[in-house]
Image (cartoon, helix red, strand yellow):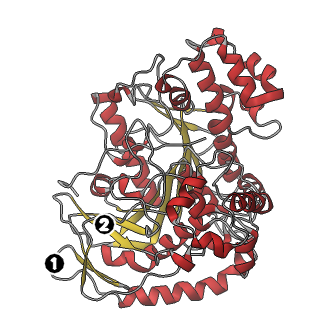
Amino acid sequence: MTTSSLTRRRTRTTQGSSPSWTRRLRGALAGALLLSAAGLGAAPAAAADDTAVTTRYGQVRGEAGESAHAYLGIPYAAPPVGDMRWKPPSPPARWTGVREATTPGDPCMQADSSTPWGDLAGPGTPDEDCLYLNVHTPAERSPRDRPVMVWMHGGGFTIGSGAFYDGGELAARGDVVVVTLNYRLGAFGYLAHPGLAGESPQGVSGNYGLLDQQAALRWVRQNIAAFGGDPGNVTVFGESAGGGSVCQHLVSPRALGLFDRAIAQSGCGFPLPTQESQQRTGAAWADSLGCADVACLRSKPAGELLTASLNPTARWVPNVDGRVLPLQITDALESGRFHRVPVLQGTTADEGRLTVATTYDLAGRQLTAAGYPVAVRALYGDRSEAILARYPLSEYGTPAEALGAILTDSQFACLQSRTAELMADHTRSYQYEFADRHAMDYLDLPIGFPLGAPHGSEIRYVFGGVSGTPAQNALAAKMLGYWTNFAHTGVPYAADAPRWHRYPKVQNLAPEAITASTTFPQDHKCDLWLQTGQARS
């Protein structure tokens, strides 16, 4: 299912203990981190110009704002072009002089995306040369290094960009340094192929987009102190595919030491294909292009590859390769093989309604009562009768709301609840449900049913982009406080807001009131969805 994200457009006016499986890696990685720390120690502080900062690769000059400064389009890895296409990222080249960091780098290769919020690619033209990040810092100086929040954008691993999200207000109001980034998407980020595996010392392929994200996190460890950020206090957070990425880094041995807290919004336990199945799919895709080997694929223009990658039979997602991702997320969590950092995660109350709206109303048709069981049978096959019995139309205002509830529970709510439960056995685990049923009313979409609190609707509440009713504005302020104080301390709290208890209590975030619940699995019929594996379109 294609996922989408939400934020306001950029403005320029403001700107527990580790598990045993990781101990084997600690010695080797500790040396690498010590070298990184040496580089940090050598990096000069900000130059005389308030927005000039020296990184280990060269000096950048950002854009000053009244409440926050922005440093845009900073390369964190070399361009993955030519022979570097479908290879792990390598460090960027150094530069001399001052690099102007006032324009975002181009987004990664992707097709035009029409969403309720516009084109998720953001500014720029999609390009293979896209591994850039953006840093937002409070304008006010601080005697102490600030916590760092690194955002992984959503978009189903096929669309999106870091520059679509303005981190200035989050940085200023939360007293944090915010980093947003691009990572390779679609076939460019997730093609697995036997020829690529043959090039790899580990014999694996795919997952290049995840490796890009880890390269960006290493860049943060090595350079963020020059921007006033604390390299020893990094929170990785993301939504949808970005939330899934966060949980993938939680179980990836290669992410050891790269972050200290994690926030996964509307994405964590998504089942992933195996390396073998993805290589078979990749080889078949290459054959469709007339390519029997990787050299042929690398000779193809990027635009031709992008067009070919839009084939609906291709699934461009991370894969369980035994190295970058040793296990399925839930299997790794169940066995305790993940990085023991505090985790905050959750979903929106009506995740699936946006998919229904996009498939039906926004496409010029309506889901009828007669069409409801047809749609369910097309999605769930042999399980359909049991599902229809648990989601009778009589319990919902419209067929669209009934189908939305099925998609919400099967694809998001129950998966996320299960991962929160598994993490709670080993670390501080916090779960939420965002429930502003009027969060997207401001878009005034031509939809014949209440959109509620759908997928992506909580993002602008976190980033400080809400201008709604007094109750909505108050909820947004509390959510920004919960998120940023979690980054500061590992515990979500906010001024004048109810205490947030650990799992199994779930924090219900609604404008009417913020309350704690223990009935989330029952409310979302998780006994049905967690019996024999989770369905996902």
Residue 332 locus on image (x, y percent): 74, 59
Nearer to the camera, 469 or 124: 124
Nearer to the camera, 474 or 527: 527
Nearer to the camera, 33 or 94: 94
Tell us which disc is closer to us: 1 or 2.
Answer: 2
Q: Label 1 vs label 2: CA separation?
A: 16 Å
Please give the name of the residue rendered at 77% of the width and 37% of the height, measured from the top-left corner. 530
- Residue kind at label 2, given as amino acid type: Leu
Please give the name of the residue rendered at 83% of the width and 38% of the height, measured from the top-left corner. 532
From the viewer's perspective, is 79 left or right of 276?
left
Nearer to the camera, 81 or 177: 81
The answer, for residue 259, to whether it is visible in the render is no
Query: Farthest residue toward the top?
Result: 394
Residue 431 locus on image (x, y percent): 57, 43
Mark found first going from the N terminus, 1 or 2: 1
* Residue matched to label 2: 72
Dot 2: few (<14), some (14–19), or many (≥20) neighbours within 10 Å?
many
* Residue matched to label 1: 49
| In contact (CB < 8 Å): disc 1 and disc 2 | no
From the viewer's perspective, is 122 left or right of 244?
left
SS state under label 2: strand
Dot 1: few (<14), some (14–19), or many (≥20) neighbours within 10 Å?
few
